[in-house]
Image (cartoon, rainbow, N blue to C red):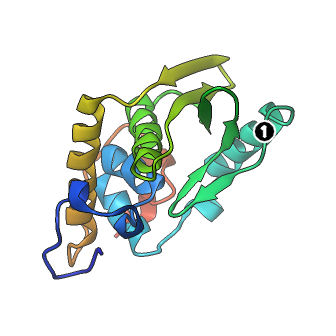
Amino acid sequence: MLSRGKETSRVGDLSPEEMVITGVQVNYFLVCKTKLWFFSRHATMEQESDLVSLGRLIHDGSYTKSKRGEVKIGRISIDFIVKGDTLIIHEVKKSDKLEKAHKYQLLYYLYYLKRRGIKAKGIIDYPSSRRRVKLELSEEDESEIERILNGVKEIISMENPPKPERKPYCRKCSYFELCWVS
């Protein structure tokens, strides 16, 4: 189990019940480690964000027919699932500007499900650009996910937030004031 101040085993050695990291944390690790640290301390600034609200509207308005509703499994929340010969999980995103973070968030969901004995494939849906990215979890992806998860554990166990790095999207971030307004 993840705990502050104590050494824990590598993520790959954890049982499914011990995996307490969310997909959002995986995403934030790749986007901004300072944002990850604040989010992991329950400083959830997204409720106030117009961009997050817009993303919810795009999600809800674009997939009413095929959307089965958000599916929660343990610590992960999948936007929707399509059942068939193969389980297909979908992650809906407003824009592909942070595609690498989106990709690893979805790969983490596939990894998480695999650890629970569920084989699935994934699709990132970008309804604004009518684009889809199909993903399957490879052994290389699993190794990278484990590296990311260990990095997440390291960041969230820090006593203080990592020093923010100015990025092109900082001004639009809901955590902007925590990082840059003093």
Query: What residue sits 47% from the left and 72% below the top?
Result: 43
Vertically, is 112 above or below 48?
Answer: above
Check disc 1 and report its element: helix, strand or loop.
loop
Percent of width and height locating residue 56: 71, 46
Q: Residue furthest right?
A: 65
Percent of width and height locating residue 123: 56, 28
Query: What residue sits 68% from the left and 42% below the top?
Result: 80
Query: What residue sits 61% from the left and 17% below the top?
Result: 131
Mark 1 lies on residue: 67
Of the pair 43 and 60, the residue shown nearer to us: 60
Examine the rendering and report whether any part of residue 32 can be seen: yes
Percent of width and height locating residue 139: 26, 31
Amino acid type at mark 1: Lys
Of the pair 55 and 74, the residue shown nearer to us: 74
Of the pair 38 and 177, the residue shown nearer to us: 38
On screen, residue 73 versus residue 112, left or right, reads right
